[in-house]
Amino acid sequence: MREWLRRQRYLIDYSLSALARRPGKHVGLLVVYTLIVFLLASVMLFTHALRREAALVLADSPQIILQRQVAGRHDLMPLEYLERIGRLRGVSALYGRLWGYFYDPAVRANYTLMVPPESSTGHRAPDPGEITIGSGIARTRGLAVGDYLSLRSARGEPFSFRVASLLPTTTELVSTDLMLLSAADFRRFFAYPEDRVTDIVLEVRNPREVRTVAEKLILALPDTRPILREEILRTYDAVFGWRQGLVFVLLAGAVLAFVIFAWDRASGLSGEERREIGILKSIGWETGDVLRMKFWEGTILSLTAFSLGYLLAYAHVFYGSAALFEPVLKGWAVLYPEIRPIPFVDGLQVATLLAFTVFPYTVATIIPIWRAAVMDPDAVMR
Amino acid sequence: MITLRDVSKVFNQGRGNELWAVRGVTLDLDPNQMTVLRGPSGSGKTTLLSMIGALSRPTSGRILLDGELLSNLPERFMTQVRRRTFGFVFQGFNLIRGLSVLENVMLPAYPLAPVHGDLRRRALALLAQFGIERKAGERVEWLSGGEAQRTAICRALINEPRILIADEPTANLDSRLSRELVGLLDELRALGKTVLVSSHDPLVFESDRVHRVLEMRDGRLAEDSRC
């Protein structure tokens, strides 16, 4: 075992010196390799961080949202449904919500307008005439606390709201386009019927009973549809997963180009390198020794490129807000949230990335290297 | 003792450019002697040396080392025999550029994985024996012809082989260095090594330190003179 380790050390020593002796050839490969790892790792780290971020923010969202449907479409919920639901076993809170969307043609962006529920501990409903807005709206419209935001109501009348406060940036991923206002303003602005709410929220004391409560709701109110928090989380997961897949498909071309590049580099051994392999074989190295030496050369190059690429991707995602992939992966049209994802590294993710980058490189280089290694040892004498 | 029986070597057999480099050579080489293979370029000296040194196999015939058949061994075993038994000094020395003198000398021992300190000491002792220990840390491309020649000899000796094979070792040297080289080879012979040299340099094959001169012509052994 010791002898084996010593042999590997000698081979690694030689590989390192071989890499250092031909910097021109290897630096080019290292740069391309690092770039590939950087791109793939950035997408992986960022998507993963977004999922986690969404999961953390949505952890406090309602357990059940009940929507009314007419002909398969979402419809306004009559207030009397609150009474019809009555006292369901296990339900700790029950209230109607008012929320909707507004398209602002001035900046060509969609806002989410919402009345904070009375039971919500996070934010007190703004006073009439006042609003609380998300960072995306503030940035896009150039608003600060105390400024006025004028919008055109559903009846075509101008409405002015005073910005009372801004939503915290920590929730920007889901609150960037949010505008909180009072119930009275909401109803007047949208010409919303007084006996209707947008949907109904239910909090369930025991999370295991959520599905049972949802089933009871379907039986009691057949024209409604309960939406569970876990379903929303799953949807977010699928959306970000789909986006990650899309970017990976686009990057597959880059990986393929890299494989061709690596193959070309490995098969294009210079006369000097061939001569060197010939000398090594003539002075007593076996084909296996040459292959092992080349294996270490590839491994050193791969691990260096992988470490550099991964570190750069880490900095790009967690310190540079993933500037390169923001538009594709976040998915907002105009109101891009500015988030600082929480640094997080997943072992399985690192292993997957290693397989996606080191494996193609190894496969691409092994055949040309083997061809060079089986060279006749007397070639150097001829 | 090295024995060759009806050894032939053909390149590109069956093709238009077929070349018989060695034809039916039968020969016995005694240990602890300096033997020179002489002859013009293309006479088959180098091909014959490479077969004797287990660098290649004959197309037909047999080569035996101390009675053991060498020419039919699989590559792996042939490499082991080559490593253990033969040391090579090539034409132009074939040192690896970019590496230091010491690293070049240690290189043949890497696959055997000796303790690094021991290997280093052995390499430095060899360099001292040939008077170039001061150059140990220098890159080989900065060496003079004589220093490169000594480095190549040290590299050939690092695995303590019994037989030293030198292919046209004076091709790139002036007369003084050529004579010096013959002297060094003779010193090694005096230490118990068998020395086999291919050369068409009179300074080598006419030297009084040479025991036997074999003349090659068109791949055949034309003359065998013992001095």
Image (cartoon, helix red, strand yellow):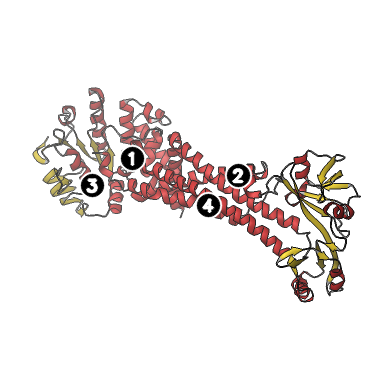
Callouts 2 and 4 in the same chain: yes
Q: Which residue is mark 3?
A: B56
Chain of the residue under the numbered disc 3 shown in the image: B
Q: Which residue is mark 2?
A: A313
**Sequence order check: which comes first, mark 2 or mark 4?**
4
Q: Amino acid at mark 2?
A: Ala
* Distance between mark 2 and mark 4 Cα atoms: 19 Å
Would you say the residues marked 3 and 1 are in contact, meaning their CB atoms lie under 8 Å apart? no
Vertical placement of residue B50 versus A181, above or below: above
Q: Nearer the viewer, mark 3 or mark 1?
A: 1
* Distance between mark 1 and mark 2 Cα atoms: 36 Å
Vertical placement of residue A50 versus B33, above or below: below
Callouts 2 and 3 in the same chain: no
**Sequence order check: which comes first, mark 1 or mark 4?**
4
Q: Secondary structure at mark 2?
A: helix
Q: Secondary structure at mark 4?
A: helix
Q: Which residue is mark 4?
A: A249
Q: Quadrant of the C terminus of chain B?
A: top left
**Residue that appears at 33% across and 37% down:** A271
Vertical placement of residue A240 versus B183, above or below: below
Q: Amino acid at mark 4?
A: Val
Q: Position of residue A236 (x, y in %)?
A: 67, 58
Callouts 3 and 1 in the same chain: no
Q: Amino acid at mark 1?
A: Arg
Q: How many neighbours does mark 2 have within 10 angstroms: few (below 14), some (14-19), or many (20 or more)?
A: many
Q: Residue B162: in sight, yes or no?
A: no
Q: Which residue is mark 1?
A: A274
